[in-house]
Amino acid sequence: MLTPWIRRALAVAGSTALVAMPHLDGAVAWINSGPVTSQSLRGKVVLVDFWTYSCINSLRQLPYLEAWAAKYKDAGLVVIGVHTPEFSFEKEHANVARAVADAQVAYPVAMDNNQKIWRAFNNEYWPADYLIDAKGRIRYHHFGEGDYAATEREIQELLEENAATGVSGDTVRASAGGIEAPPSGSVRSPETYVGYRRAENFASPERLTHDAPQSYTPLTTPWLNHWGLSGFWNVGAESAVLQSAPGGIVFRFHARDLHLVLGPTTDGKPVRFKVTVDGAAPGDDAGVDVSADGTGVVREPRLYQLIRQKGFVDDRTFEIEFLDAGVHAFVFTFG
C-alpha cells in the first residue's frame, strides 16, 4: 500500500527498488527521548505516526500505537510520533508535553513545528502511519484511523522478516474510554471550523466578519450541520475569540459525541461555560469535560468532549454559553 509519490519514486528508481525512509531532521524538540535519526533506526522495524494532539482521529488511534510499542518492543519495533501542529497553540512545548503525558505516550515524539518531517514524507494527513523495514525502506502506509488489524499484521510480517522470534499472530484489541473511545456508526456531522479560513455552514443572520469585533444574533432553529454565534466575537483565521461575556455558539448536529477544540484567554485565565442539548442540561449525555448540569471550565488549549449521548442518536441542537470573555473556539469534531 504505497502513496502516489512513493510509486513515482519507484518508477524512477526501478521496480526492484524501495523508497528509503526520509530523514527525521528538523524537529524543534523531542519529548520522551533525545533526537532520533533515521540512521540510528537501521536494524529496527519503525512505525512513524504523524499526529497532532487536538485531532480526535489522532487521539482515538493512540491506544493502538501505545499497545504496539509495548507488545513488540523486544521484537525490534520502534514507534516514533511526529507531532505536526494544525493550530498555533500546538507549537508550544509545554502544551504538547502535557498532552503526551496525559495520554501516557511513552515512545519518542518529535515536535515538527515547521513541517520539515511532514514535507520530507510528503504527508498530507492526520493521522498517517508509515512502516519502515530494518533496512530503512518504506514498506506500508495507512492514512486515517481504523484498519488496526491490517496494520498490525504488516508489523508482524516485517518483524518476522527481520528474524524476530516469538512474534504472536494475535492482534491487539485496545479498549479505550473517554475521548479515545472508537467512533460510533451514527456520525452525520462533519468536522466544522470556527475560524474563517475554513469555516462552512455559518448561519447567524449577520455576515461572518474577518479579524474585527462583531455582534452576532442567537440562532433559534438552525438547519442540520449549521452553526452560529451569539454575542460579541472577533473571528480570526483559525479561531473565534469572545470579546465580552456572555456569548455562545449553537450547532445542530447528528452524532453520539460532540467535541470542540477550545483555548482559555490569551494570558491563560480559565473560562467558565455551560452547555445544553435541545435547551436542557445534558445529564447522562454529558461528555467527559462537562458535569451533568452542563457546567465546565476551559483551562488549557485542547479538545473538549462536551456531549456523549447514551441513548438514541438523532438531530439535536447543541448550545454552549461562555460566562467569561477571552475564550478561543477552533473546530467542532464528532464521533
Image (tube, helix red, strand yellow):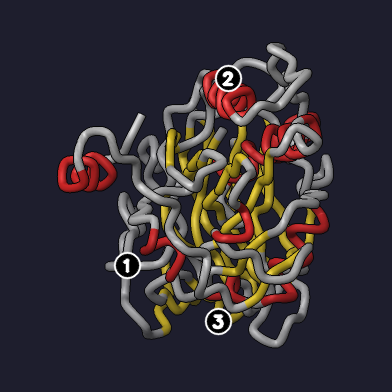
Q: Residue at x 58, y 19 (%)?
A: 153
Which corner quadrant holds the C terminus? top right
Say which label, 3 or 2, has the lower sequence index: 2
Residue under numbered circle 1: 197
Up the image or down, 82 lies above or below 25; here it is: above
In the rendered image, residue 327, in percent from the top left (x then y), is placed at 62, 72
Residue under numbered circle 3: 243
Looking at the image, is mark 1 or mark 3 nearer the viewer?
Answer: 1
Q: Residues within 10 Å of mark 3 (few under 14, many from 20)?
A: some
Q: Residue 78 carries which label?
A: none
Residue under numbered circle 2: 153
The alpha-carbon separation of the residues under discs 1 and 2 comes to 40 Å
Q: Which residue is drawn at 72% across and 61% down?
A: 273
Tell me where residue 210 sits by quadrant. bottom left
Q: What element carries label 2?
A: helix
Q: Residue at x 66, y 26 (%)?
A: 163
Say which label, 1 or 2, has the lower sequence index: 2
Q: What residue type is labelled 2?
A: Arg
Up the image or down, 114 lies above or below 191; here it is: below
In the rendered image, residue 224, in percent from the top left (x then y), is placed at 38, 35
Looking at the image, is mark 1 or mark 2 nearer the viewer?
Answer: 2
Q: What element carries label 3?
A: strand
Which corner quadrant holds the N terminus? top left
The one nearer the camera, 232 or 126, is 126
Q: Are marks 3 and 2 in contact (CB under 8 Å)?
A: no
Q: Which amino acid does label 1 sit on?
A: Arg
